[in-house]
């Protein structure tokens, strides 16, 4: 994988295979045909030579072929001191070495060789198994190094101590940008998920990465000061194919232009014999060339979501030009892909065009259009209240008390699962209550609730005080910039301590009015009804201050707080009117759905013909179940609503499509990582939209770098046969049902296909189960356990065998074959394993603490008195999320 074929280099460098082959032969590289492979270093030198005719200083074209390099080891000339100062400059490790490095010893201890070399410079390195060493005199590449060294600036960098192994990044199937760290030898992660630094930087700066046109040869051969070198991984099939396509296209365009005499014929042809031939052959070809306007565009106005080809047209460039620029930065796009903001910025800079973006959604933003029209007949409207607070602090009970209806009793686990909205009257004035549940799984819903809300009631149980979700609720309220009233509940309880609640909240900056702050604290009891009137009065007072108004003469604008699919009714949306009046027969749009309002049902079950501002109601007539939190606007006609909804749906679909087809190279490498990453495909079915959103939100958060939930389908309603079929199509997937249960036929099908349907009535149970499932799928965490330590008392060098360390086991047990590290002065200098363990002259399987023994370390002989040999083993533990 460290090698690259001539044809691949030719493609990248934009040269012909033969041309490059000739150059490679001139340089004495071992190549026969276009598919011959050379090393990345050689590739760098070759491209440089082929393009600019330059060679790295000191490089001499060899007269005869030299043997293949295994390892190039170069020592600081004349620095004979056998001390740690001795410097070994560069080691080029080839495939065999890499293979060897796959062994635990070398892989886990990237820095080890350096330390080892410091201690036992030349001899040890030469003895290392599997690495053959070629001295500088025997090896041309080494000559390059030597000659380079003579160059003052390079010499400076070279003469720094330490060994620097140039190791190619380990082969990664699709990862394109290889990162070769010259400094941190071998410490490269096996499958680095990090974005290649240079590409990431280039993205940020908009700087184009010049892969081969730049002086890459010098980067590789002498750029020891460089942190890393980023190269294209030609081994990736997709990229290779993409490059081939682009190259093919480029060639065709070039040919067309040449045929039409657009390009400077002779020089070009003389320079590129291949093209000359194709020109001869191409005699019959059409002389037609697409007229390319030469007009230079300096400023354009484009939609925010523009496709590659649209952008190209706007800036008067070819699609290929646009693709190329992004490709060079590691972003792979096709002509139909949408460009991101960053990409547009990069392109604008590259093409020196001033780009102004406009949002096409502006045209589709029906809410903004509604808001742009001024209200003319403003009237006071009821406040919309959301109750939030910690679990079990009494939200539902309070709302029940206010409405004098019991809801909490009916719910599974006593937990409120849905978002409901109701209206009550106090002193002839109406107040609308949105009931939002109080657990973090509903955070999303809660924040949506806050958006539709004028005032938030934070319920705090007087006997329990401020709890985590109280704080969360406060944060959400603050973020939404909504005023809040604190209801100190459960005042009937003997343990009630309202002052404690006040103190705790005051600490958070929520100071009660009677303590000189600005927050109303109302002591209440949902059980006895104590303080409820006060609470309602406080709400009305606050509303008055806020001067909440709406224009009932306008067409309606409403917020969807919950939606569901109901038997006999179809999609039902629970809405609260924000402005205007909603009437039966109105046409409306809600996000991507639309419809004609067939019925309006109030919270007490009555059907009405129309409802005004702040009124909650269930509406029937939409074509699909709208999303919770979306805004409904009444349109002039059904056609208008339909067209708008369809356009919005199409827009979103395209964006989604673009998202799924478009992948930058970085994304690709991440995708690979995610390919390794095990994911749990799930189908989620829930009774109402609100719960679905909450489950989705929570499941999406349940991931780490390794495991994630992949929602393959989601929907409101029961589990269907088609859900089962879908789940069956994805390996290891499950169907998660919330408040839905499979019916007979579905159950049978699931049984037949072996698809698991898990039903829940409490969201937390569902989430906990998934968390457990994911935990089981995660690779075990491998940690280390030290098994023993032995001190080296003396050493014996035994002929060809090597050095035996006479040790005393100071701790634990030393076992033959176990992993071991050599510690000198507290520093780990080598990692290997116990290759031989003897008690007196006998082989021993293990030696316990307090006993003496002879130890040999595999591939390591520079053992010294006072060293400590530590043995260890890897322990696997099941990871938890
Ligand atoms: N003594 C007393 N108990 C109360 C009061 N308010 C609520 N409770 C009890 O506290 C428990 C939780 O009340 P809920 O109304 O379900 O609390 P919640 O905040 O809606 O709970 P979730 O919906 O689970 O978030 C129930 O057992 C109630 O009976 C009160 O004022 N006094």
Image: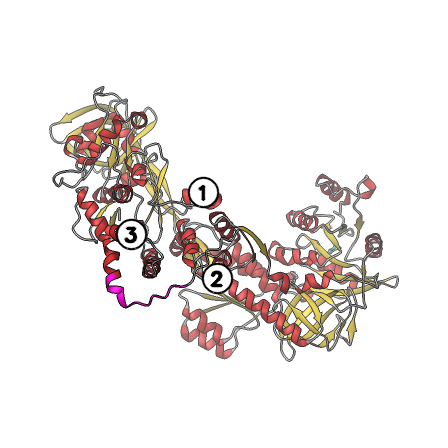
- Label 2: which residue? 658
Residue 569 in which image quadrant = bottom right
> Could you tell me which residue is drawn at 44 percent across and 65 percent down?
733
Q: Say few, some or many: other residues with alpha carbon within 10 Å of mark 3 (under 14 / 14 to 19 / 20 or more).
A: few
> Could you tell me which residue is drawn at 83 percent across and 62 percent down?
378
- Label 1: which residue? 201
Residue 452 x, y percent position in the rendering: 71, 59
- Label 3: which residue? 268
Q: Secondary structure at mark 1?
A: helix
Q: Dots 1 and 2: beta carbons under 8 Å?
A: no
Is 282 included in the stretch rendered in magenta? Answer: yes
What coloring was used for the rendering? secondary structure
Residue 82 x, y percent position in the rendering: 22, 21
Q: Which residues are magenta?
A: 280-290
Could you tell me how far apart the alpha carbons at marks 3 and 1 are, in whole angstroms? 35 Å
Among numbered discs 3 and 1, the one appearing first in the sequence: 1
> Could you tell me which residue is drawn at 13 percent across and 39 percent down?
66
Is 587 included in the stretch rendered in magenta? Answer: no
Tell me the mark number nearer the camera, choosing from 3 and 2.
Answer: 3
Residue 19's place in the image compared with 116, above or below, is: below
Residue 873's place in the image compared with 611, above or below, is: above
């Amino acid at each position: 994988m460290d090698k690259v074929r001539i044809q691949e280099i030719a493609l990248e460098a934009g040269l012909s295979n033969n041309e490059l082959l000739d150059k490679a032969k001139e340089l004495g590289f071992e190549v026969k045909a276009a598919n011959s492979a050379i090393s990345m270093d050689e590739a760098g030198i070759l491209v440089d030579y082929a393009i600019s005719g330059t060679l790295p200083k000191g490089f001499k074209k060899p007269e005869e072929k030299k043997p293949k390099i295994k390892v190039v080891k170069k020592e600081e000339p004349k620095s004979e001191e056998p001390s740690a100062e001795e410097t070994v400059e560069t080691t080029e490790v080839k495939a065999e070495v890499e293979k060897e490095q796959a062994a635990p010893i070398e892989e886990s201890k990237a820095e080890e060789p350096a330390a080892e070399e410091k201690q036992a410079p030349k001899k040890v390195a030469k003895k290392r198994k599997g690495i053959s060493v070629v001295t500088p005199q025997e090896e041309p590449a080494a000559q390059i190094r030597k000659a380079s060294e003579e160059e003052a600036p390079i010499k400076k960098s070279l003469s720094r101590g330490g060994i620097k192994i140039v190791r190619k990044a380990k082969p990664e199937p699709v990862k394109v940008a290889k990162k070769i760290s010259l400094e941190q030898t071998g410490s490269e992660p096996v499958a680095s998920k990090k974005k290649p630094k240079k590409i990431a930087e280039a993205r940020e700066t908009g700087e184009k990465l010049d892969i081969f046109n730049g002086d890459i040869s010098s980067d590789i051969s002498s750029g020891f000061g460089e942190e890393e070198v980023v190269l294209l991984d030609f081994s990736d099939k997709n990229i290779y194919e993409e490059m081939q396509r682009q190259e093919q296209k480029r060639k065709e365009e070039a040919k067309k232009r040449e045929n039409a005499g657009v390009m400077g014929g002779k020089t070009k042809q003389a320079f590129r014999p291949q093209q000359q031939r194709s020109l001869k052959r191409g005699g019959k070809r059409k002389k037609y060339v697409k007229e390319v306007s030469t007009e230079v565009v300096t400023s354009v106005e484009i939609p925010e979501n523009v496709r590659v080809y649209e952008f190209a047209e706007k800036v008067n460039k070819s699609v290929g030009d646009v693709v190329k620029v992004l490709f060079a930065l590691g972003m792979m796009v096709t002509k139909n892909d949408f460009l991101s903001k960053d990409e547009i910025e990069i392109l604008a800079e590259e093409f020196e065009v001033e780009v102004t973006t406009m949002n096409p959604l502006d045209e589709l933003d029906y809410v903004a259009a509604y808001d742009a029209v001024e209200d003319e007949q403003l009237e006071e409207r009821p406040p919309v209240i959301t109750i939030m607070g910690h679990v079990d602090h009494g939200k539902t009970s309070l709302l029940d008390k206010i409405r004098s209806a019991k809801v909490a009793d009916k719910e599974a686990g006593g937990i409120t699962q849905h978002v409901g909205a109701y209206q009550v009257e106090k002193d002839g004035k109406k107040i609308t209550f949105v009931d939002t549940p109080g657990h973090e799984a509903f955070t999303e819903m809660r924040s949506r609730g806050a958006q539709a809300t004028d005032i938030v009631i934070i319920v705090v149980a007087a006997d329990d005080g401020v709890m985590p979700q109280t704080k969360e609720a406060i944060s959400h309220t603050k973020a939404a910039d909504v005023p809040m009233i604190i209801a100190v509940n459960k005042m009937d309880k003997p343990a009630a301590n309202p002052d404690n609640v006040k103190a705790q909240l005051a600490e958070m900056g929520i100071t009660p009015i009677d303590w000189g702050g600005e927050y109303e604290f109302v002591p209440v009891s949902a059980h006895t009804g104590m303080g409820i009137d006060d609470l309602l009065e406080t709400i009305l007072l606050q509303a008055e201050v806020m001067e909440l108004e709406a224009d009932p003469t306008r067409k309606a604008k409403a917020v969807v707080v919950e939606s569901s699919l109901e038997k006999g009714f179809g999609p039902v949306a629970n809405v609260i009117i924000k402005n205007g009046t909603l009437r039966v027969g109105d046409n409306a749009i809600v996000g991507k759905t639309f419809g004609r309002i067939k019925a309006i049902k109030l919270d007490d079950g009555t059907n009405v013909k129309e409802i005004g501002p702040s009124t909650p109601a269930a509406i029937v007539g939409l074509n699909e179940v709208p999303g919770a939190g979306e805004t409904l606007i009444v349109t002039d006609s059904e056609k208008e609503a339909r067209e708008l909804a369809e356009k919005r749906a199409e827009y979103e679909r395209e964006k989604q499509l673009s998202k799924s087809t478009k992948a930058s190279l970085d994304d690709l490498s991440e995708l690979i990582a995610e390919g390794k990453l095990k994911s749990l495909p799930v189908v989620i079915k829930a009774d109402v939209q609100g719960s679905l959103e909450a489950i989705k939100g929570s499941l999406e958060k349940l991931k780490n770098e390794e495991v994630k939930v992949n929602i393959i389908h989601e929907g409101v309603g029961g589990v269907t046969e088609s859900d089962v079929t879908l789940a069956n199509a994805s390996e290891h997937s499950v169907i998660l049902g919330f408040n839905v249960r499979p019916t007979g036929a579905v159950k049978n099908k699931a049984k037949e296909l072996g698809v698991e349907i898990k039903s829940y009535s409490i969201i937390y149970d569902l989430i906990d189960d998934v968390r457990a499932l994911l935990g089981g799928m995660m690779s075990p965490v491998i940690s280390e356990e030290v098994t023993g330590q032995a001190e080296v008392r003396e050493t014996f060098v035994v002929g060809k065998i090597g050095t035996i360390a006479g040790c005393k086991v100071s701790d634990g047990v030393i076992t033959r074959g176990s992993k071991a590290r050599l510690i000198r002065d507290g520093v780990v200098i080598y990692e290997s394993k116990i290759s031989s363990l003897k008690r007196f002259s006998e082989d021993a399987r293990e030696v316990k603490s307090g006993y003496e023994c002879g130890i040999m370390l595999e591939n390591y002989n520079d053992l010294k008195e006072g060293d400590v040999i530590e043995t260890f083993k890897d322990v696997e533990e099941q990871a938890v999320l």
